[in-house]
Image (spheres, rainbow, N blue to C red):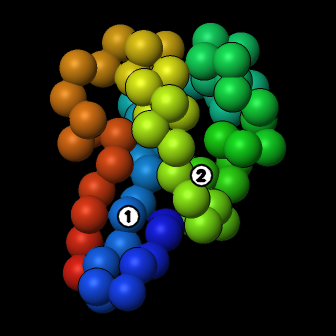
Amino acid sequence: MNENEGGRKVEVLINDLLAERQMSLRELARLSGIEPSNLSNLANGKRQKIYLEHIERIADALEIDDISRIIKLTKK
């Protein structure tokens, strides 16, 4: 999750997506071209910045058209 000053959190739903597809993080890394460590940090909320390019690559790799399936914005 990524927190900003406005009291909201951005959550990247990688773990949910991988579970739905019975896919490993390494497989997503291979398909998306994103380092496994970066995907792991995104999935576990350890990234301070979330790059749009990474979200686009994840969407392409998982054939997702709706960004709300990948990220969620919630209040703290």
Residue 35 drawn at (x, y percent): 77, 31
Q: State left or right for residue 12 relative to residue 33.
A: left
Q: Residues within 10 Å of mark 2 (few under 14, many from 20)?
A: many
Q: For residue 42, which numbered disc appears in the image?
A: 2
The residue at the point 68 percent across, 18 percent down is: 33
Q: Position of residue 3 (x, y in %)?
A: 44, 77
Report x, y in % for residue 74: 25, 72
Residue picked out by circle 1? 10
Looking at the rendering, which quadrant does residue 24 occupy?
top right
Q: Secondary structure at mark 2?
A: helix
Residue nearest the observer in this picture, 13 or 7 = 7
Is 51 rendered above or below residue 29? below
Which residue corresponds to the image point at 26% horizontal and 35% vertical from the top-left? 67
Disc 1/disc 2 C-alpha distance (Å): 10 Å
Q: Amino acid at mark 2?
A: Leu
In the rendered view, tell whether residue 38 sits above or below residue 8: above
Res 19 visible: no
The image quarter containing residue 60 is top left
Q: Amino acid at mark 1?
A: Val
Label 1: how many Cα within 10 Å (few below 14, some 14–19, many 20+): some
